[in-house]
Image (cartoon, grey):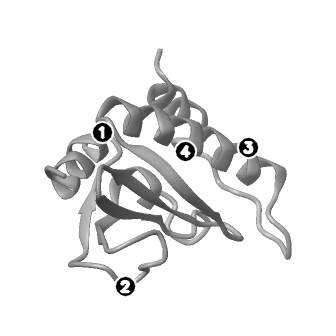
Amino acid sequence: MNKMERLVRDFGTHEFSSGSTAGKDYRSFQTKYKNMLKEIIGQIGGELIKFNKNHYCFSAFVKRGSRYAYFSVSDVRFFPNAWKRNILVRTAKNEKDFSGGSNNYTSLEQLGGKLNKILGRS
């Protein structure tokens, strides 16, 4: 079983805790997601250059050659399946470009292919 399959198995129907600080369950999920993301990005020859931890959501920047992509997962408490079915990805000018190019959405299973397409050739 790969990291993606384990993540879906462990959190696919999970109802996350909520509070003024991120719960232990969410912190574990975020760490596992980040590790899975590194694996996916490595498979397409990219690099995770910035991972922005937030309260119950997160974003990241990916680089391959001279091209950048922005990646974002919505709040897992209010959008419970968005982390696997509705992931935002788009081009970026650099690792500080949060507005970037046109919004694209993809599923977890298609994430590597979508990032590969967005990053294009350097």
Measured in 3D between alpha carbons, the distance from the residue under mark 2 to the one under mark 4, in whole angstroms, is 31 Å
Three-letter amino acid code at disc 3? Answer: Ser
Q: Please report whichever mark, 2 or 3, sits nearer to the chain's N-terminal start.
A: 3
Please give the residue where the numbered disc 2 appears in the rendered image. Answer: 99
Q: Position of residue 31 (x, y in %)?
A: 67, 44
Indicate the quadrant where residue 17 lies: bottom right
Three-letter amino acid code at disc 1? Answer: Glu
Please give the residue where the numbered disc 1 appears in the rendered image. Answer: 109
| Secondary element at tag 4 | loop
Q: Using the image, determine if residue 31 lies above or below residue 55.
A: above
Q: Please report whichever mark, 4 or 1, sits nearer to the chain's N-terminal start.
A: 4
| Secondary element at tag 3 | helix
Measured in 3D between alpha carbons, the distance from the residue under mark 2 to the one under mark 3, in whole angstroms, is 28 Å
> Label 2 crowding class (10 Å Cα cut-off): few <14, some 14-19, many 20+?
few
Q: Which one is in front in this view, the residue at disc 3 or the one at disc 4?
A: 3
Q: Which one is in front in this view, the residue at disc 2 or the one at disc 4?
A: 2
Q: Position of residue 70 (x, y in %)?
A: 38, 66
Counting labels gives: 4
Q: Please report whichever mark, 3 or 4, sits nearer to the chain's N-terminal start.
A: 4
Please give the residue where the numbered disc 3 appears in the rendered image. Answer: 28
Three-letter amino acid code at disc 2? Answer: Ser
